[in-house]
Amino acid sequence: MANVLSPEQQEQVRALGRLGWSLRRIQSATGVHRGTVRNYLQAAGIGMRRERGRRLEADDRSSTSQVTLDAGAEAKPTSQVTPGFGAAPAVAEVLASAAKSRCEEHRDLIAAALDQGRNRKSIWQELVDRHGFAGSYQSVKRFIRKLHPSSAVAHPRITTAPGEEGQVDYGTGPWVKHPKTGRYRRTRLFAMTLGCSRKSVWLLASQSSSKVRCELHETSFRRLGGAPRTIVLDNLREGVVAADVHDPTLNSLYRDMLAHYGTVALPARVRHPDRKGKVESAVGFAQKTPLAGMRFDSLEEAQRHLDQWTERWADKRIHGTCKRQVAEMFAEERASLLALPTEPFRYYQQGVRVVTSMAASRSRRRTTRCRRA
C-alpha cells in the first residue's frame, strides 16, 4: 500500500475514529496500520481510545474454564458426572421407535420438498399452514434426520454491539413473470441483516444497478426505522469499483448515499466471505424457506409473499445461535440505530468524459480528406 492513503480510505479511517473504534479494530477492519491510523486521527483532531493490555492472569483463566471439585473427588468425563444417566436414553429410544411419527402420513410431501432443496423449517411451516399439522418442529427435524442423515458443523459466534453493524448481500430470487414478454425471469434477492439482533430485511428487484442498490438500502433503512453505523458489503461493482486487498475504491454514488445517513462502508476482504456470514445465512434462509420452488405472476406478489413470511415466521423464530426471538432482540436494538435524516438523498448522474488522443484525431482528419478527394 502506498504511504499516502486514498481520499476514500482517509475518510473511512476518520469516520471509524469518530465512532469511537480503537486503533486495533480500525486496523483489523481496513488493513491500515494503527500507527498510520493514529497519525490521521491526530491530524483531524479526533480523540482515540486507550489501548488496553491483556492482563488476564492464569488463575482467572483457570477459574472460568474449570469446575471446582469436592475434596477427595475424582475427575470424571462429562458423560459420567450425572448418576443414572445410562439407562434413560435406551428406554427413550425404545418408546420413540414404538410410537408412530405424525410426519409419516406426509412422507411423500416431505420427500418431494427435500428434492426441491427446501430446508426443514419451510417444510414444517407448510405442513402447519396448509395441512393442519399439529406436530412440533422438532418432530419434523427428527423425521428428516432419519430420511437424510447429516452432520452439523460448529462455527464461532461473532458478537456485535447494538446498532453497530449491518451486513448486505445479493442472492438469486424466485421466478417472476415479466409484464411485457410474459416469460418467467429470475429476480435478485437483496438482504440486509443487523449484526446484533439478526433482524433481516429481504427485498426483490428485477434489475440491478448502482442506483437500484442505493434505493434498496434506503428502503431497508426505512423498514428498520434507522441506519446502522457501519455496513459490511461484498465487492460487487455496484458498491466497490476496484476490489483491492488493502485499498478498495468505493462507488461514489454509493459512498455519498451512505454518508447521507451517517453510515460507513466496510468492504469485505477478498477471499474472506466469513466476514459477512450473518447476511449470507439470511440469504440462504430466505431462498430455501419461503422462495424455494415458487413462481409468481408479478414482482409485487412475490414481495408481498416474502413480507408475510417475514412477519409470520422469520421475526418470530428463536434464533439458533442467540436462543432468543428475533423480534424481541430487534426491539432492544432499534433504539441504538442512527436516526434517519429529514431530507431524502438526492441522486445525481455521473458524467462520462471521452478523451481522444492526438494520434486518433489526426487519423480521423486524414480519413476525412481521403474520402473528400
Image (cartoon, rainbow, N blue to C red):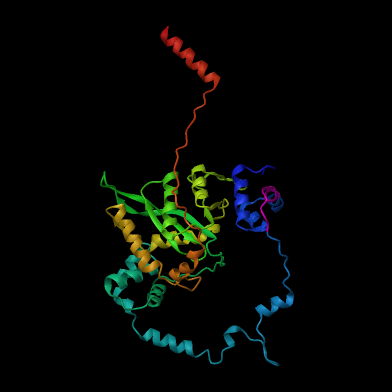
Q: Is residue 19 left or right of residue 309?
A: right
x and y percentages locating residue 261 in the rendered image: 50, 52
Q: How many marks?
A: 0
Q: Nearer the viewer, residue 109 or 42?
A: 42
Q: Nearer the viewer, residue 224 or 158?
A: 224
- Residue 298 in sight here: yes
Q: Residue furthest front?
A: 342
Residue 295 included in the magenta stretch of the image = no
Quarter of the picture containing the C terminus is top left
x and y percentages locating residue 60 in the rendered image: 71, 77
x and y percentages locating residue 80 in the rendered image: 59, 87
Give me the residue at 73% from left, 65% from top.
53
Q: Residue furthest top?
A: 373
- Judge whether 135 appears above or below 82 on screen: above
- Residue 108 in sight here: no
Q: Is residue 42 left or right of residue 167?
A: right
Residue 40 included in the magenta stretch of the image = yes
Quarter of the picture containing the N terminus is top right
Residue bounds of the magenta highlight: 39-48
x and y percentages locating residue 265 in the rendered image: 54, 51
Q: Nearer the viewer, residue 208 or 341?
A: 341
Q: Main secondary structure of the magenta part?
A: helix
- Judge whether 127 appears above or below 20 on screen: below
- Judge whether 164 appears above or below 151 on screen: above
- Judge whether 293 appears above or below 74 on screen: above
Q: Nearer the viewer, residue 231 or 67?
A: 231
Give me the residue at 69% from left, 53% from top.
34
